[in-house]
Image: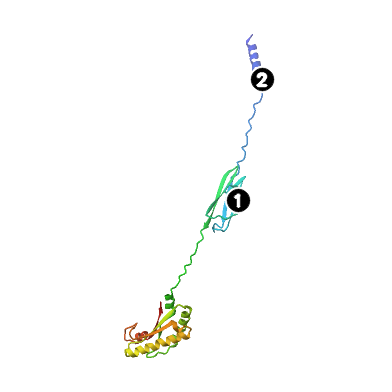
Amino acid sequence: MNQSEKRILLLAALLLAMLVSGCGPKPVKTQTQTPPPQPKPVTANLSASPTSIQRGQSSTLTWSTENADNVTLQGAKVDASGSQSVSPTRSTDYHLIATGPGGTQDATARVTVAEQTTTTTTTTTQTDEEIFNASVQDIYFDYDRADLRPDAQQSLARAAQVISQHSNWRVRIEGNCDERGSTEYNLSLGEERASAARQALSQGGVGGDRLQSISFGKEKPVCTESTEDCWQKNRHDHFVLLK
């Protein structure tokens, strides 16, 4: 075989190879797959109104969720949104749990139960002596006089009312004078002053058997200065509750 024939044969072989490769199967293209959409996140909200109550009162729990397919309140299944009245006997935290494809969320609301304050009213009972001292006041006289002044008459009228309301009371009326004059004269004047008060109390409804009178004259002064103000204080009837 000459050189020319070899070239022809080689070209024919190359052409055949090209034809064979061009008719072969075409490569398969790989398709890109779109990932599935991400689930929406779960949300949960819970509130209480009012947040503080007295024991025995009620509070309303209100809740809402999104993207949840299972919702529980204090472990019990509830709707995705709603409200519920509660009456706890002590402060309580309420828990809401919402679960869905997008995860789990929880919310908390606290209801505070205030302790009821017991107000204790203490009644102080006055003794007879305290009532007597507050109601039966000393009365005063003008100089060298034993007749009752208007203020003394009013004071004795009030005293008679209180004494009449306490049937177990017995009262001593003590007549007193200032330092001027003799001992004998002031003893007599003091007796007249005590008798005037005793008569007024009797007229006000106090039985005479519950009253005593005595004169101390000028022997029991409450003030020892020689002034008109001091003398006025000594010209008085003093009342004592007898036990």
Is 16 positioned to the left or the right of 136 in the image? right
What quarter of the picture does the C terminus occupy? bottom left
Q: Which residue is mark 2?
A: 20
Give the vertical position of 180 relative to 101 (above or below). below
Task: Work out whether mark 1 precedes mark 2 in sequence or the reverse, and give the earlier one.
Answer: 2
Q: Secondary structure at mark 1?
A: strand
What quarter of the picture does the N terminus occupy? top right
Q: Position of residue 36 (x, y in %)?
A: 62, 38
Give the vertical position of 113 relative to 188 (above or below). above
Q: Is residue 180 visible?
A: no
Q: Secondary structure at mark 2?
A: helix
As rendered, which of 207 and 20 lies closer to the eye? Answer: 207
Give, as a three-letter code, the residue at label 1: Ser
As rendered, which of 105 and 173 lies closer to the eye? Answer: 173
Q: Which residue is mark 1?
A: 64
Give, as a three-letter code, the residue at label 2: Val
Residue displayed at 60% across by 49% down: 65
Q: Position of residue 84 (x, y in %)?
A: 60, 53
